[in-house]
Image (cartoon, rainbow, N blue to C red):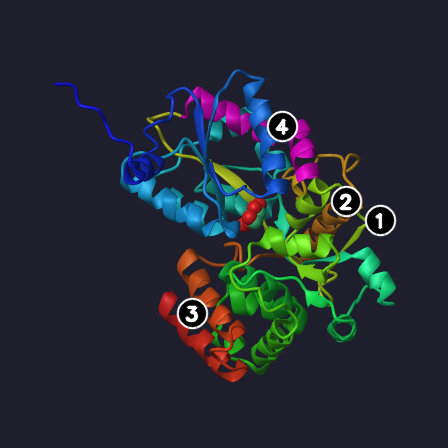
Amino acid sequence: MRKFMKLTTSTLATLAITGSMAVAEDVEVLHWWTSGGEAAALNVLKQDLESQGIGWQDMPVAGGGGDAAMTVLRARVTAGNAPTAVQMLGFDILDWADEGALANLNDVAAAEGWDAVVPDALQAFSKVDGQWVAAPVNVHSTNWVWANKAVLEVNGIAVPTTWEEFEVAVNTLAAAGLTPIAHGGQAWQDATIFDAVVMSTGGPDFYKAAFIDLDPEALGSDTMKQAFDRMSFIRANVDDNFSGRDWNLATSMVINGEAGFQMMGDWAKGEFLNAGKVPGEDFLCFRFPGTQDQVTFNADQFAMFSQGDTVSDEQAALATAILSPSFQSAFNVVKGSVPARTDVSDEAFDACGKQGIADLAAASASGNLYGSMAHGHASNASVKNAIYDVVTAHFNGEYDSETATSELVDAVSIAQ
Ligand code: GAL
């Protein structure tokens, strides 16, 4: 008697987890680029590969910042069925490399000369013990503010350059009956704002001491308490429906003129562009007040999971495509990020992109380039998640600033 497999919801979920529908010679790519702007950028990569005759097996896992994607990845690897290629950030790459899960990309890197063109700050997350384990796609940074230009003009607001000016601007918008700050209450979004607030409040040495060196004195300092107080000000100026909102919906509030500002990484620009908006005309991009000279970066990379002794032809083709100068320009123009190679012209980039490229080079040269805590470039996932928990509990009113400061010290200490 023939047996038919009944495709129940749970079977489909299992198939999604095990990936057993994947076609062997395709590349199966696990990623979290599901918003309109992100999907438009991903298409640039898909089309590049398809033009080389390589099929694309899409494995999207929605959820900005990639936490949900990383959970699915762990399940897939545990089930013995890792995807071919995975979007990954910072310390997650290093952790998977330590587990011996990632393919060695040295042959591709040598053939394509990656060593000479990928900046050291990125190589620190792409190479482990001299071995290339990931192909960097871009460099994003978190200390940006996105503003609706008309909303600012109508309310007589100039681009704020200090925290104090920012407070005045926010209060002006509130008095006009607008939502001053568009925000989505998800832990990674709260943390993204915290990156910039801590950098602005304490400066780069403080940011490094707190998030990279995990110095308990910095974590428990009055400066940190002040940063939490500033988070409270921000919390008081988001709308009532912010809880759980996806980041791109918050961007839409700025696009539509419901809100004045969004503090978000430059993937937000992809949403403005996808909505047909023009920087300098419809929207403004500027560094979070008080962080004009600093860049808190995160770089998306694709790590290839070992499928045998050597990297497969498809994985090599994907890695080669990602680092090609023409792709780096075409993709990052759409995504809102800047190239991961130092030798790509800024010609095709809009004003925000040109500023992003210039800021990155300047911050790198002056020692003001730091990994983003919120996006896994300052510490490993367990420390990052410990910081998330405290920041979010404070943002939601569970802790006052003083309690949050001491909880931060404890949480980071336990997580290490
Ligand atoms: C970041 C990632 C970006 C963007 C963002 C929101 O972690 O680096 O490329 O996708 O999440 O999803």
Answer whether labels 4 and 3 touch (C-beta < 8 Å): no
Disc 2 marks which amino acid?
A: Lys
Distance in Å between CA atoms under marks 1 and 4: 31 Å
Q: Residue at x 52, y 59 (%)?
A: 188
Q: Earlier in the sequence, mark 1 or mark 4?
A: 1
Q: Separation of disc 3 and disc 2 at Cα?
A: 41 Å
Amino acid marked by disc 1: Glu
Task: Name which quarter of the figure residue 328 lies in.
Answer: top right
The residue wearing badge 1 is 281
Verify whether residue 332 appears in magenta: yes
Q: Give the residue number, with chain letter if any, for mark 4.
A: 324
Front-lying residue, 186 or 103: 186
- Tell me the SS state at disc 3: helix
Task: Examine the image and state in which quarter residue 295 appears.
Answer: bottom right
> How many neighbours does mark 4 have within 10 angstroms: few (below 14), some (14-19), or many (20 or more)?
some
Give the residues in magenta. 311-334
Q: Find residue 160 and report its image quarter.
A: bottom right
Q: What is the number of the mark on residue 277?
A: 2
* 170 left or right, relative to 393: right
- On residue 412, the disc is 3
* Near-viewer residue (32 or 332): 32
Task: Look at the numbered disc 3 and say if its residue's Cβ is closer than 8 Å to ligand 1.
Answer: no
Q: Is 81 left or right of 289, judged from the image as shown?
A: left
Mark sitting earlier along the chain (4/2)? 2
Q: Which residue lies furthest to the top in this view?
A: 53
214 shown above or below 60: below
Would you say the residues marked 2 and 1 are in contact, meaning their CB atoms lie under 8 Å apart? yes
Residue 96 location in percent, x, y? 38, 44
**Main SS of residues in magenta:** helix
